[in-house]
């Protein structure tokens, strides 16, 4: 997969998402992956022991973390201002009533993205998992929960920053957007989940090889790596197929 | 680029040239044939040129095939284990060690080395008589008895009721558990080596010392009844007028062999006839065939075992006092009734001996009951050899490694340790003599067998301490017995290790040849710029000259130095010559060389898929789960093309691309539901290929699958033709009628087959059999005779209509025709793809006939996916990349598993040979089995040229070169897999799972590559020739 610098594209000049320009955002965006991984590491034993209840109960803290992350760090859909406009030294506009705009502009979109990713993305991801070889007649709860974790990790922040615009989502799926930490997180999650399938067949007879522990583990690690890479090294680059 | 090379690069001139050229091309395309005066001549020249280029391509790929054969041969000859066969024979008058007791050696009347116990013997081999068939079923919890339980109780009952007349023991086979191998083990007493496993189709005579030969040397009259494998092993050993052999390969026939044996064996047991023979070997096949056909858990198995039970009871009744009756299985069967591997169910057979005299005993009273499971007190199958030899007064065959069976020598009271010790001492001494000769012949020093030698010495010392003629007590003999049998056990395990003896230089050279051939293919397929058909001649010439020179040098050097192994040296030298020659060829065209490393995501994905799969074969787990890995990769490919389709700017391309990508993924997943699990996949896998895990017949609902395929698939394929209005001419006849009819016929075949299996219409069995064979033959005739004639003589799938209005359809080529009317050529935009595509459907029909109903569905899905793949390639404009041929390789490998196969010997569906034939006919029977086994890969290989032809303009330049490139890439995929599996098998040659996993995968990989090489040359390249010639006949020649 060759990645080159963003070349001039004729139509909608999609730009990389920057995190909000305040100290909380800059700080929390680094704490967030640590929290997510810690949460998973903390739950890992019980997930291995009994995946269904453990994965279900992990969903709640994961949702809280992800909602907090998008609300604190990311610009909600429609508000992302192209970075070019900000000139160095330009004064920031005075924000109206901080709490009110916080609830209206952040918390509600964050919860909307949570609902959308949980209800709309989870079934799609679950079907994809089955198409990739997940058990078709058994382990339904396992697979759905795996899909839910993937959706919360990968899709929730994307919905928050891009909304539900069809064209943008086509570009998202077509891997046409420039890479940023949200997009990188999504790609990382799915790549991680893909690679997570590798240890399943090995004859190591480990408890953690059972469905869907490795997939979810891969997704969490992939999410963190992808988010980190997307926010730093690869930021602004585009994925080229040819 | 012609213009770039032949013209000065002044822009103005180049532009003018391009304009003129474009006009010329447009003119040519408009009038179907150019109208210049010498056009016919030019066309003729172009055709000759094309045919020459094509022949050179054929020769080039044949040369590659030749190199593959050299590499595989060299590796195989060093890898598949060989045991040195010693020519020595044991002689009646030469004891292996000084006589133990005052006993005159050398009379086969009294017993050669040891007093004989029985005058005559009847040895009944019930093929695949598993041990748990013979013991009573003991419910384990709520488990219900299966059909194979409690159906042949006579063996167990006699052993319990008359322990001095009979005993029953588990009888453990050395894998591979194929009948031919087992017969060798049962008569020679040696360990098998892997290479013979494949020679079941045509057994070869045993030339090492064996029990049958010893009996014959002693002028015993031998009779054989049943399985004709015996005659391949022991030609001319049996009394010709009493012996009756039956074809062993018709596994669908449960009764002919058995009835034949029974019919002839009982008359021979009449007192008036007993003088005509000394030993009878009767080989019943019904149990084995019932297993292959229905699986063990089927009423047919109960019936068969009951029949065996009755036969054995009758034999007991008619047996005379001096005759020994032996009933045994040569191997077991797995849960589906197949065998060949080394699972417990396959190796655990039963052994039962019976005599009217009270000869047999047990060393402990508890042993009077036969073991409940085969894990307790098992004896090895090779133990039969010394046992029978001594009981019948024969010398023990020279190469024997087995030991006398305790029950047969311990005496009726279970006290005669002296006899047991003497028997074991004789056997051990013969083993010792054999080992000594073997070490001499192989040039081994004693260090490799120091432990057995020490055991031998201590056992012998104990014996010597006893002194000759002195009466030892029971415990002394008991301890001597156990020391000799310890020596035997240790020697056996040393031999098992020793005969895993590989010829490493040959293996290494074989791998090297394969690796270099792979590099040649890689550069040819992905590292050349420009038309392959122009570049091949120089490569072929140089490579070919190199091969011949190398072979000459190699042969010459072996004449000069005769101590060199000539065939090894010649092969290596010709391979080195080939590589050097072709390297000079590549050097000559070095300006056309580019890096074969990928540049686009598609190239990388191809490489990652291929390398990841190959690397995985180093681990037994990834080899076992290959089917799931392929599913994962194919789905990944589908997702990537869906993503790529969404990136397309053209909306039609985007929508079509997405649709076909999603379809491709869905079909892959649907096909993945057809599974035949290998044993190692248990318990995480459930077989769906047959009616149940313990069956090898289809369930009734599966019979609907062929009909669904027959009704739907022609419609779907037609849709791919309709898209470009290519459903014209021969396609209407072939796709619309013949293919449908052929598929319906083969669906009918499978229904009749099920009717025959299930005996739906009792009494009509023979009629059904005849009908279904005729139907199968007609189907094959439709596919290969009618189909190929259609394909050969068909015009391109075009139709010309004259319209008064101009058509708006984008796929039409519109030609101004003076006034208002216009001519529309229907099918113009996919003239190459639609024409060649017919060939895929021809092979689809032929392959689907030889697949069972579930596999029929899988092959149907594979065909559908192949056509979807063409559309994906076209809408994403990636037909030039390596991904198409590689995905076809993955798809073929995937459907190999979906058509009920695994990389194991036991999943070979031998019965396919009898679909259109009643008996084995060479070469057709092996070809049919190959078509069944590798059908999916063959189908995908046939489809390769279409990747570069689909929706290409009629006069596209360099199309033949593109076909060569695609075929080379496809071969490259299989060559990488083959090299990897070969390397891993060689590297892991001491691995515990070698014979179970790595060796079968290596054999599969090598066979697939050779089959695909041949199919690419004979079907794909030749088909491309036919197709391109017929298109050029209409449109004239572009420079191919």
Image (cartoon, grey):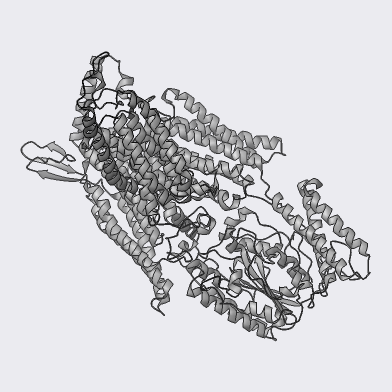
Quadrant position of residue B476: bottom right
The answer to whether one can see residue B219 in this image is no
In the image shown, does A120 or A131 lie closer to the viewer? A120
Quarter of the rendering occupied by the C terminus of chain B: top left
x, y (%) of residue B265? 63, 79
Q: Position of residue B92 (x, y in %)?
A: 82, 67
Q: Residue at x 38, y 57 (%)?
A: A137
- In the depicted view, which residue is nearer to us: B102 or B151? B151
Rendered position, B781 above or below B1005: below
Q: Is residue B479 left or right of residue B1034?
A: right
Q: Is residue B202 left or right of residue B896?
A: right
Residue at 62% over, 33% down = B553
Check the image and report above or below for B237 versus B1039. below
What x and y, as percent, mark residue B979?
Answer: 53, 40
Residue drawn 60% across the image and 43% down it: B986
Picture layout, residue B598 above or below residue B921:
above
Quadrant assignment for the N terminus of chain B:
top left
B1012 relative position to B988: left or right: left
Closest to the observer: B318 or B475?
A: B475
Labels in figure, total: 0
Q: Position of residue B577 (x, y in %)?
A: 57, 32
Q: Is residue B994 visible?
A: yes
């Amino acid at each position: 997969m060759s990645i080159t610098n963003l070349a001039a594209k004729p139509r909608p000049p999609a730009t990389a998402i920057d995190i909000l320009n305040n100290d909380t955002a800059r700080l929390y965006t680094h704490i967030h992956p640590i929290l997510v991984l810690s949460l998973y590491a903390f739950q890992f034993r019980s997930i291995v022991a009994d995946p269904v209840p453990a994965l279900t109960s992990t969903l709640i803290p994961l949702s809280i973390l992800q909602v907090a992350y998008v609300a604190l760090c990311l610009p909600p859909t429609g508000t992302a201002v192209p970075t070019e406009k900000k000139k160095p030294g330009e004064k920031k506009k005075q924000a109206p009533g901080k709490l009110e705009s916080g609830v209206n502009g952040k918390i509600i979109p964050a919860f909307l993205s949570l609902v959308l990713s949980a209800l709309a993305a989870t079934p799609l991801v679950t079907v994809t998992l089955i198409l990739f070889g997940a058990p078709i007649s058994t382990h339904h709860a396992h697979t759905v929960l795996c899909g839910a974790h993937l959706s919360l990790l990968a899709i929730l922040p994307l919905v928050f920053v891009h909304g539900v615009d069809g064209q943008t989502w086509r570009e998202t799926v077509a891997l046409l957007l420039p890479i940023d930490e949200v997009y990188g997180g999504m790609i990382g999650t799915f790549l991680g989940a893909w690679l997570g399938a590798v240890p399943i067949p090995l004859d190591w007879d480990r408890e953690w090889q059972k469905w869907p522990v490795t997939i979810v583990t891969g997704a969490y690690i992939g999410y963190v790596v992808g988010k980190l890479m997307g926010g730093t090294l690869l930021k602004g680059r585009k994925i080229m197929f040819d | 680029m012609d213009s770039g090379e032949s013209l000065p690069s002044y822009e103005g001139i180049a532009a003018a040239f391009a304009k003129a050229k474009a006009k010329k091309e447009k003119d040519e395309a408009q009038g179907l044939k150019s109208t210049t005066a010498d056009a016919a001549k030019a066309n003729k020249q172009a055709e000759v040129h094309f045919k020459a280029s094509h022949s050179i391509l054929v020769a080039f790929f044949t040369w590659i095939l030749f190199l593959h054969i050299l590499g595989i041969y060299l590796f195989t000859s060093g890898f598949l284990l060989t045991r040195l066969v010693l020519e020595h024979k044991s002689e009646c008058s030469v004891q292996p060690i000084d006589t133990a007791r005052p006993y005159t050696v050398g009379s086969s009347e009294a017993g050669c080395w040891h007093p004989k116990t029985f005058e005559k013997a009847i040895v009944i081999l019930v093929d695949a008589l598993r041990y748990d068939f013979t013991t009573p079923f003991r419910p384990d919890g709520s488990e219900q008895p299966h059909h194979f339980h409690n159906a042949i109780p006579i063996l167990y009952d006699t052993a319990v009721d008359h322990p001095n007349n009979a005993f029953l023991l588990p009888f453990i086979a050395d894998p591979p558990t194929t009948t031919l191998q087992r017969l060798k083990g049962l008569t020679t007493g040696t360990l098998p080596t892997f290479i013979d496993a494949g020679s079941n189709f045509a057994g070869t005579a045993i030339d090492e010392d064996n029990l049958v030969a010893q009996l014959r040397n002693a002028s015993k009259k031998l009779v054989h009844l049943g399985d004709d494998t015996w005659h391949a092993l022991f030609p001319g050993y049996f009394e010709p007028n009493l012996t009756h052999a039956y074809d062993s390969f018709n596994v669908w026939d449960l009764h002919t062999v058995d009835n034949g044996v029974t019919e002839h064996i009982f008359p021979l047991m009449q007192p008036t006839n007993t003088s005509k023979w000394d030993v009878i070997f009767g080989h019943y096949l019904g149990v084995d065939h019932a297993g292959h056909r229905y699986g063990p858990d089927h009423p047919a198995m109960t019936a068969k075992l009951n029949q065996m039970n009755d036969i054995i009871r009758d034999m007991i009744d008619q047996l005379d006092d001096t005759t020994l009756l032996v009933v045994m299985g040569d191997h077991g069967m797995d849960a589906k009734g197949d065998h060949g591997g080394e699972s417990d169910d396959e190796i655990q057979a039963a052994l039962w001996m019976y005599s009217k005299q009270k000869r047999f005993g047990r060393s402990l009273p508890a042993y009077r009951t036969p073991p409940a499971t085969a894990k307790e007190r098992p004896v090895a199958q090779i133990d039969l050899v010394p046992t029978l030899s001594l009981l019948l007064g024969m010398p023990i065959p020279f190469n024997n490694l087995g030991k006398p069976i305790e029950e047969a020598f311990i005496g009726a009271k279970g006290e005669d340790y002296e006899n047991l010790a003497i028997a074991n001492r004789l056997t051990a001494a013969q083993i010792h003599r054999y080992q000594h000769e073997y070490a001499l012949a192989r040039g081994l020093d004693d260090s490799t067998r120091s432990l057995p030698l020490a055991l031998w010495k201590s056992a012998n010392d104990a014996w010597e301490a006893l002194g000759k003629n002195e009466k030892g007590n029971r415990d002394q003999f008991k301890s001597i017995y156990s020391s000799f049998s310890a020596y035997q056990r240790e020697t056996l395990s040393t031999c098992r290790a020793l005969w895993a003896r590989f010829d490493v230089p040959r293996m290494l050279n074989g791998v090297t040849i394969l690796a270099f051939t792979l590099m040649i293919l890689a550069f040819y397929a992905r590292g050349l710029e420009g038309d392959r058909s122009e570049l091949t001649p120089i490569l072929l010439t140089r490579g070919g000259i190199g091969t011949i020179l190398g072979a000459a040098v190699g042969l010459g050097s072996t004449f000069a130095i005769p101590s060199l192994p000539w065939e090894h040296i010649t092969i290596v030298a010709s391979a080195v010559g080939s590589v050097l020659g072709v390297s000079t060829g590549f050097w000559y065209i070095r300006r056309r060389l580019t890096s074969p490393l990928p540049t686009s995501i598609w190239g990388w994905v191809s490489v990652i898929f291929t390398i990841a799969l190959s690397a995985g074969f180093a681990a037994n787990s990834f080899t076992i789960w290959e089917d799931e890995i392929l599913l994962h990769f194919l789905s990944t490919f589908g997702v990537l093309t869906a993503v790529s389709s969404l990136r397309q700017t053209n909306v039609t391309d985007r929508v079509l691309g997405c649709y076909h990508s999603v379809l491709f993924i869905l079909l892959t997943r649907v096909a993945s539901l057809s599974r035949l699990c290998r044993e190692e996949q248990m318990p995480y896998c459930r077989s769906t290929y047959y009616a149940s895990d313990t069956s090898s017949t289809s369930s009734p609902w599966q019979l609907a699958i062929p009909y669904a395929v027959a009704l739907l698939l022609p419609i779907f394929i037609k849709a791919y033709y309709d898209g470009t209005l290519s459903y014209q001419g021969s396609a209407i006849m072939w796709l619309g009628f013949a293919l449908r009819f052929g598929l319906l016929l083969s669906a009918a075949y499978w229904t009749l087959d099920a009717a025959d299996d299930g005996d739906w219409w009792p009494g009509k069995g023979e009629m059904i059999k005849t009908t279904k064979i005729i139907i199968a033959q007609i189907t094959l005739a439709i596919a290969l005779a009618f189909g190929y004639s259609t394909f050969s003589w068909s015009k391109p799938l075009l139709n010309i209509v004259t319209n008064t209005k101009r058509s708006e359809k984008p796929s039409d080529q519109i030609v101004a025709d003076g006034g208002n009317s216009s001519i529309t050529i229907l099918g113009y935009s996919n003239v190459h793809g639609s024409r060649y595509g017919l060939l895929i459907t021809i092979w689809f029909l032929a392959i689907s006939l030889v697949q069972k109903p579930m596999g029929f569905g899988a092959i149907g899905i594979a065909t559908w996916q192949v056509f979807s793949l063409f559309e994906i390639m076209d809408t994403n404009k990636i037909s030039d990349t390596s991904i198409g041929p590689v995905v076809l390789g993955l798809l073929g490998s995937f459907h190999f598993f979906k058509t009920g196969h695994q990389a194991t010997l036991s999943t070979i569906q031998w019965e396919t040979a009898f679909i259109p034939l009643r008996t084995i006919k060479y070469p057709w029977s092996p070809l049919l089995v190959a078509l069944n086994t590798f059908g999916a890969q063959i189908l995908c290989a046939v489809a390769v040229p279409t990747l570069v032809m689909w929706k290409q303009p009629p006069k596209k330049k360099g199309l033949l070169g593109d076909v060569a490139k695609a075929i080379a890439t496809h071969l490259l995929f299989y060559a990488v897999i083959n090299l990897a599996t070969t390397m891993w098998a060689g590297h892991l040659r001491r691995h515990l799972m070698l014979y179970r996993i790595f060796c079968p995968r290596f054999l599969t990989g090598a066979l697939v590559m050779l089959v695909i090489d041949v199919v690419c040359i004979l079907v794909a390249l030749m088909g491309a020739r036919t197709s391109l010639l017929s298109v050029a006949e209409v449109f004239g020649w572009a420079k191919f």
